[in-house]
Image (cartoon, rainbow, N blue to C red):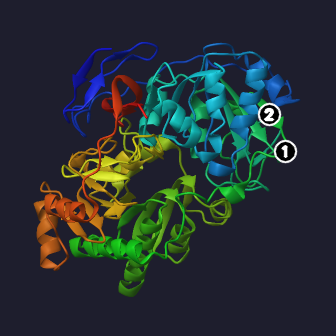
Amino acid sequence: MDMVKNSLGRLVPTEVPGLGNFRPFEGAFAMAGTKAKYCAFEADTVPRGKSKITADIRTAIINSGLSDGMTISFHHHLRNGDKVLEMVLKEIGSLGIRDLTLAPSSLSDSHEFVADYVRSGVVSRIYTSGIRGRIGNLVSRGEMEIPIVVRSHGGRARAIEEGSISIDVAFLAASACDDRGNMTGSFGPSMFGSIGYGMQDSRSARHVVAITDNLVPFPLAPKISIHQHLVHQVVVVDSIGDPDKLATGAVRITRSPQQLEIAHNAYELIKAVGIIRPGFSYQAGAGGVSIAVTQYIKKHMTDKGIQGSFALGGITGDMIKLLEEGLFKAVYDVQSFDPKMGDSMLRNPTHYEIDPSCYANPMNCGCMTHELDVCVLGALDLDVDFNVNVLTGHDGYLRGASGGHCDASAGAKLAIMVAPSFRNGVSSIKKQVQTVVTPGESVDAIVTERGISINPRRQDILEMALKADLPVKDIEDLRKEIISLTGETEPIDFDGSKPVALVEYRDGTLIDTVYKVRS
């Protein structure tokens, strides 16, 4: 495997057996303005009058023509409550189908069982945004022959449209579906809100199977997210998952004094920059700090009588309160972090359900992340060049997700990273991050409870922060201050001859490589 240094000095392969050729990262905006590629693909059709109702998942798999070496996709909107991926893989395994490429929009903690299907040979390649738990450990220990490919949400949308991901069969969970295949996630006993990733997959797969636990009379009403002309089969199961487990994991409201201090510092920086003004647009992650920042911004907008333009991204309940209180005109929802978002989409005409290409694909005519004024994003660790890691833990294991991180950071006029100065006795600010997911040139500020560091590229923001008497610190000084408390961390024992994951930047270039952990 030939390795070259990209513009960040990271070694990345130019060709990987089983995956193909790759181009090294050249800069966050190096591909801007280049021509987009759109693939032509063959899709199955359904004869007039033929019923789409199929008896069970096993029969649907057989009907789809799925065979060895093909690619299957899923959406992860049910997050830790998802049951569909396991039901499908169980039947595929029992049918003796092998060597599949698994290309879900992401893998969560509930998908640890995927490790069993890798070891049995059912799955031999994985394209994903996130990977954690037992399957993350398996990959990190080098048990897969072919490295996985990690893409952002916008990058996955681009890859599907250009044909880098060619989906043979998409299995899409629906909380409500009729017998023609019209479906949605916005109502029903298992509603999960937006089905944005499924919208994209339904347009690009050769064969689409809707899986629902709520078959309703035709026509599906009052809302159709994916229309019948894109769906080949409908399977009814007892349960697609548990929506109560949707808002778990990173999605929480913090009461930690440390996290509230970080949130307040971030809010003060946003206020100092003067960007909370009429027409303001905003994206925050689903972590406790990001949610707390939103609460500070909400109070500011209320006190000053400011109405913003839109909120974007993974949508939480607090965002909908801002919409319903008139603080934002619209919400664009590619992924809901609360099943109640389905109710909101039905009652709020400007709670828009969008697909990930509209959300964050940099290679179209104008994705929504490029319209952002401010984004507030979490991080596992960061470095003195403002590079951000949201994928690998301090032990080198895969335990995170690219998500929309680099997409929002590249698009927003003010991109703020929030993180505690250290976790479990390990500094969050390094000389060099272990894995670059978001490049420092697209990051404007790092905010901790110990101070705020401004990227030297943004002297305008630095001047405004200093004028507001914020606790601004040079990033190297902040790192040394934290290290004086935590000490330096021991280097991780990686096997540099064994890449286990390739991190693709949103434009399709390789930004970093993750290696096998020896111990």
Can see residue 408? yes
Nearest to N terminus: mark 1 or mark 2 = 1
Residue 309: name its quadrant: bottom left
Measured as percent of width and height from the top left, residue 47 is found at 79, 20
Q: Is residue 283 above or below residue 495?
A: below
Left or right: 189 in relation to 385: right
What amino acid is found at the position of numbered circle 1 in the picture? Leu
Task: State how far apart marks 1 and 2 are (Cα).
Answer: 9 Å
Left or right: 486 in relation to 201: left
Measured as percent of width and height from the top left, residue 258 is found at 38, 74
Measured as percent of width and height from the top left, residue 89 is found at 71, 29
Q: Are marks 1 and 2 in contact (CB under 8 Å)?
A: yes
Q: Nearer the viewer, residue 186 or 453?
A: 453
What amino acid is found at the position of numbered circle 2 in the picture? Val
Which quarter of the image is occupied by the N terminus? top left
Can see residue 508? no
Residue at the disc numbered 2: 234
Helix, strand or loop at disc 1?
A: loop
Residue at image location 28% in from the left, 71% down from the top:
270
Residue at the disc numbered 1: 215
Q: Which mark is residue 94?
A: none
Q: Is residue 31 above or below residue 490?
A: above
Measured as percent of width and height from the top left, residue 415 is found at 29, 58
